[in-house]
Amino acid sequence: MNPSSFKEKDLQSVIGWILRAGVLISMSVVIVGGVLFLYRHGQGRADYHEFTGVPAFVHSPQGIINGILELRGQAIIQAGIVLLIATPIVRVIFSAIGFVLERDYLYVGITMLVLLVIVMSMLSGHAG
C-alpha cells in the first residue's frame, strides 16, 4: 500500500474487516470446541452439588496448546475466547499502523498509549 494513496476510508475498511474476521474466526473455533466437548461429554450427567470449575490445563497457554493438539473441547473453546479477546488488540495495532501511514503522529502516540495500557493491564492482572 502506497502511503500517499492511503486514505482514512481505507483504514476504516481494514479495521472493520479485522473486527469481523476476528469475531467470525473466534466464534467458529468456539463452536468446533463446543461440538467436540458435547461429543465426548454430552451423555454425562451434571452433578450440581459439587462445583468443579474449569480444568487446570486451560489456565496456561501451553496447556491450551496441548489441549488443542489432543482435541480437547474445553481447550479449543478457551482458544476461541483468547482469539476474541485478541481481536480488539489487533485492531489497535492496525490503527497505529494506519496512523503511521497517514503520518498522523499525534494519533500514533495516543494509539500506542492505549496499547500500552491494554498490555500493562493484561500483564498485571488488574481490570479497571
Image: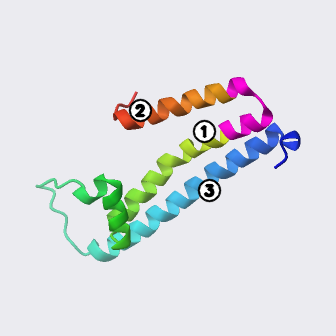
Q: Which residue is mark 2?
A: 121
x 29%, y 76%: residue: 40
Check residue 16 for magenta coloring. Answer: no
- Up the image or down, 82 lies above or below 76; here it is above
Total marks drawn?
3
| Magenta residues, start to end | 96-107
Q: Quadrant of residue 63?
A: bottom left
Q: Nearer the viewer, mark 3 or mark 1?
A: 1
Q: Which residue is mark 3?
A: 21
Q: Quadrant of residue 6?
A: top right
Q: Which residue is mark 1?
A: 92
x 37%, y 63%: residue: 65
Q: Indicate left or right for 44 with 10 as reference.
A: left
**Gap between marks 3 and 1, in whole Å?**
15 Å
Is there a contact, CB below 8 Å, between mark 2 and mark 3? no
> Helix, strand, or loop for circle 1?
helix
Check residue 106 for magenta coloring. Answer: yes
